[in-house]
Structure formats: structure tokens, C-alpha cells
Image (tube, rainbow, N blue to C red):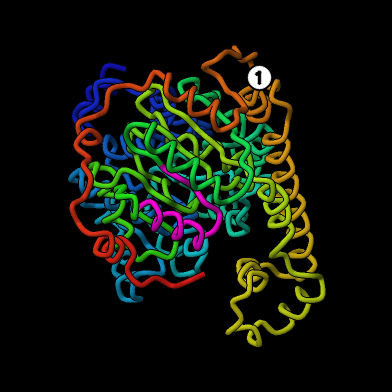
């Protein structure tokens, strides 16, 4: 163990591991496969980065998000680890071939499951020894999870072909049923697999649900909250258009605010992340695309301007607050139309049986169709039959609807029901009884919420957060700098 801590200090400059990290790394170095369920904010990436740096062997990291891949590569390169690359569609064909033809040059290769399943990619990897095969966001492999990605279903077969020395499945939000599905799909046998499952409970984060009368009041309440809450804040939206509108309103109040969504180009995205990390932006108005791979310890609050589509998504988002283990808040502003809208969204975007049959008979006729249904069907093109796809999509739709209904129950349960207990019951295999007190959770009207937060034990601001000062730029100039011409939605 002392060797591990010495390596941690050498490569990362840390003197101690976060909960779960040391057990995962020890398991991998002892030759075990590992399923690790660690809360958001516990540094899951380090669990594969450190053993890779210690062994010098090639690690393949399968990731569902292009932005997350690029962020991880950038982070490693900033640490001085230059032998890291993302093999994805952003690279030209010749660049991809250069990577595949010289695998010995790399320690970390990040790849999407769709890219990994290409014959040329598989052939290249099959002829090179792989020390560690990492499945990040492993819950995407489960049909019983709301974030199911069909390409993940091929990973079990791919693992059999590549024969990596060790396998690591990482997730922050996997209910027991999903954990079992991950192990079965990846071929992780009990005899060779170590399961390290930590509670999803983050007791330093106070949970609050605040009922709101309408959208105008919601913006008014948000403005007041940002005057009370010190330090960095992330505000989540489910619509890019609404995020843009609110960000513009906050910028007009001379708040140092940034706008983040999945359509940003990589340079803009990285610039915005760096400004937030280093305290030049205090508030981020974001869609759910923001936060994956961002390790900012001193976010004091996460505010949901609209409800997320699942309890797993809620957990992922609020887990970006209080990573320094100091007091933080997770506040949900819930209007009268928010829950019906969230439930309706869970019903949309799924193709009919007739459309599935038509698409599989001749996909070429839909090559210019970017509707949600066709975009979804393209993910399933590698499956042999329309009947198989129809069954998978029916399961996925039912799962997403069930997840939305669970989220609705979380928000609409009586005020006497402990929200933290609901979370623990849903995700922990052996749920503990939560100590429900004033520091746990609440349902409050705006005046009560303001009063609670005024008495909240906020920690002292970090130097980067304390350095934030109002901009001297005119509102017009700030708006132009913060929100250049972007596609409307």
C-alpha cells in the first residue's frame, strides 16, 4: 500500500486516496477484474490512470461521450502524460491509421464503442497486448438503465477477442439490477472479479426542492439564490434555448456567467471549462453535457432549473457540488409544468414498429433525415434484424419512462419524505437508514429557502472564487463575448 501512495504522490502530487480508489487499484494490480461503483466526484479516472502509469502497459478506455474523451486526453497531457490519444470521428482517416499502425507509441487510447467495433480497429488491437480494458460509464451497457447505448452490447464479444489482461467497469450510478447486468454483459465472472460498491450518499450536500409558480418567478428566485450562495454554481437546464436566455439575463446583471451545451466546438468548450475551473467564470448555465470529467472541487451549489429525466441523472449532476467534502447545496426549482413536460419527453423520440421496418429495409432513403427517431435508429444499424431492434427499443422506452416516473415521485412526494433516503434505497445494494435532520434535505417555499441558505454553513471561499469581481465591460460587449453566434434551437 505504501508503494501505491508513493506512486500517487509521484504521478499526481496527492498524499491520500479518495474513498474506493485504493481498493480498485490494488485489485487491478493483483490481477483481478473490477466493477467499481463510486459516487460522482470520487475521482474514478485515477483508478485506471495510476495503474497504467505504474505498469507502462496499454490501456483502452471505452467512453460514450466524445467531449469526455477529449477532456480526459487534455487532462493527461496537462499532467505531462503525452502518450494519450482519442481515436474518434474527429480525426481524419490518415490520423486514425497512424494511431492503429503504431499502438506501441501510446499508453492511453480513448475510443467510442462504435469506433471500437470497426473491423480495422479490432484487427489492430487484437495483435497488440492490452494491459487494461476500461469501460467508462458502464451503466450504458444495461437495458435496465436510462442511459442504455446499444453499441455497448458488443463489448463482451470484443473483450473475448482482444483478451485484455484486466477489465475495469466504472460507473457512478448503477442500481443493483444494473450492476448484475454489467457483469453479465462484460463476462465478469465472480471468481475473477472484485466488486467495489460505495454508497451514493453524499452527506455534505444538502438537498432541497423548491416549488415555483411560473417561469418568471423561477428566474427571480435564481437571481436571489446567486446573491446568497458564495462561490461557483452550476445551473442545469433541459433545453439549450432556455439555458441561453437565462445566461443572457444573468450576464445583464453583471454576473460572470458562461453558457455550455453539447453543440459547442472543442476549443470553445475547453476555454469555458478552464475559465470555470480557474474562477474567471462563477456561474455556468448548462445542459447535461457539462461536468463529465470536470474535477472542480469547490462548486458550492448545483441548481436544477428544470428536472432531469432520471434519478441517476440527478445524482450525476448534484455530485458535481462539494467535491472538497465541505458543505454544498443541490437545489431544484420545480414549476407546475415541469413534471408533466419531463414525463412527456420520456415518451418522445422512439420510432414506431412500421418506421423500424421501413428503415431496416432501406436505410439510404433516410440519409438526410435528422429526426430524433432516425438518429436513434442509426445507433442500432449493426443489429441483424428489425425485430431485434424493436424489442431493444421497447425495453429502452419502458426503462426511460419508468426512470421519469421515479424522478416524478422524487419531486412530488410529501415534504415529510426524506429525499436522501429515496436515493439510497434506489441505488445502494444494502441501504442504510439515513439520519434525517436539518442538514439532510427539505422541501421549501422560496422565502424559507432564502432563510435556510442565509444561515447555511458555507465554507470560506477558495482564492479563485474569492477573486471573482464584477466585470467592467458593458453589457453589450459581455453578451457578445459570452454568446457569439450560436445555432438556435
The residue pinned by badge 1 equals: 430
Considering only vertical position in the picture, is 241 above or below 330? below
Q: In which quarter of the image is the N terminus?
A: top left
Considering only vertical position in the picture, is 275 above or below 384? above
Residue 148, given in percent of the width and then of the height, sits at 63, 52
- Residue at 21% x, 50% y: name it: 471
Would residue 92 be found to the left or right of residue 413 on screen? left
Considering only vertical position in the picture, is 178 above or below 384? above
Residue 248 forms part of the magenta stretch: yes
Residue 356, given in percent of the width and then of the height, sits at 75, 73
Which residue is nearer to you in this view: 249 or 129? 249
- Residue at 50% x, 40% y: name it: 221
Question: Residue 415: which quarter of the image?
Answer: top right
- The magenta stretch is 234-250
Considering only vertical position in the picture, is 273 above or below 212? below
Would residue 447 be found to the left or right of residue 366 on screen? left
Amino acid at each position: 500500500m505504501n508503494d501505491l501512495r508513493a506512486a500517487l504522490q509521484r504521478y499526481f502530487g496527492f498524499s491520500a486516496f479518495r474513498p474506493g480508489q485504493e481498493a480498485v487499484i490494488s485489485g487491478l494490480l493483483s490481477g483481478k477484474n473490477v466493477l467499481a461503483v463510486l459516487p460522482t466526484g470520487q475521482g474514478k479516472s485515477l483508478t485506471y490512470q495510476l495503474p497504467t502509469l505504474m505498469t507502462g502497459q496499454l490501456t483502452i478506455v471505452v467512453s460514450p461521450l466524445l467531449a469526455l474523451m477529449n477532456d480526459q486526453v487534455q487532462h493527461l497531457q496537462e499532467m505531462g502524460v503525452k502518450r494519450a490519444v482519442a481515436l474518434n470521428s474527429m480525426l481524419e482517416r490518415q490520423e486514425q491509421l497512424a494511431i492503429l499502425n503504431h499502438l506501441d507509441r501510446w499508453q492511453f487510447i480513448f475510443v467510442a464503442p462504435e469506433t471500437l467495433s470497426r473491423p480495422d480497429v479490432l484487427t489492430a488491437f487484437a495483435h497488440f497486448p492490452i494491459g487494461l480494458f476500461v469501460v467508462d460509464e458502464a451503466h450504458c451497457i444495461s437495458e435496465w438503465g436510462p442511459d442504455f447505448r446499444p453499441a455497448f452490447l458488443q463489448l463482451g464479444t470484443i473483450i473475448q477477442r482482444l483478451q485484455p489482461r484486466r477489465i475495469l467497469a466504472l460507473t457512478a450510478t448503477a442500481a443493483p439490477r444494473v450492476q448484475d447486468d454489467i457483469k453479465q454483459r462484460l463476462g465478469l465472472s465472480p471468481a475473477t472479479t472484485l466488486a467495489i460498491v460505495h454508497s451514493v450518499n453524499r452527506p455534505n450536500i444538502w438537498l432541497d426542492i423548491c416549488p415555483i409558480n411560473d417561469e418568471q418567478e423561477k428566474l427571480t428566485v435564481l437571481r436571489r439564490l446567486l446573491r446568497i450562495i458564495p462561490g461557483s454554481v452550476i445551473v442545469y437546464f433541459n433545453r439549450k434555448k432556455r439555458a441561453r436566455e437565462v445566461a443572457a439575463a444573468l450576464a445583464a446583471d453583471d454576473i460572470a456567467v458562461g453558457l455550455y451545451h453539447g453543440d459547442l466546438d472543442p476549443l470553445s468548450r475547453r476555454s469555458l471549462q478552464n475559465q470555470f475551473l480557474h474562477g474567471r467564470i462563477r456561474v455556468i448555465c448548462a445542459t447535461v453535457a457539462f461536468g463529465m470529467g470536470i474535477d472542480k472541487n469547490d462548486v458550492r451549489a448545483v441548481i436544477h432549473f428544470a428536472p432531469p429525466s432520471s434519478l441517476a441523472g440527478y445524482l450525476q449532476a448534484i455530485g458535481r457540488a462539494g467535491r472538497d467534502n465541505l458543505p454544498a447545496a443541490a437545489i431544484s426549482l420545480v414549476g407546475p409544468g415541469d413534471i408533466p413536460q419531463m414525463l412527456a419527453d420520456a415518451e418522445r423520440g422512439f420510432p414506431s414498429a412500421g418506421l423500424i421496418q421501413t428503415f431496416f429495409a432501406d436505410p439510404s432513403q433516410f440519409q438526410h433525415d435528422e429526426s430524433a427517431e432516425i438518429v436513434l435508429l442509426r445507433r442500432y444499424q449493426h443489429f441483424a434484424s428489425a425485430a431485434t431492434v424493436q424489442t431493444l427499443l421497447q425495453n429502452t422506452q419502458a426503462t426511460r419512462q419508468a426512470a421519469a416516473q421515479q424522478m416524478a415521485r422524487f419531486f412530488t412526494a410529501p415534504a415529510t419524505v426524506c429525499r436522501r433516503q429515496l436515493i439510497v434505497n434506489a441505488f445502494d445494494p444494502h441501504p442504510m437508514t439515513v439520519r434525517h435532520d436539518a442538514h439532510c434535505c427539505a422541501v421549501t417555499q422560496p422565502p424559507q429557502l432564502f432563510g435556510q441558505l442565509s444561515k447555511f454553513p458555507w465554507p470560506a471561499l477558495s482564492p479563485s472564487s474569492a477573486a471573482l469581481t464584477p466585470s467592467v465591460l458593458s453589457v453589450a460587449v459581455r453578451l457578445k463575448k459570452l454568446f457569439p453566434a450560436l445555432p438556435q434551437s
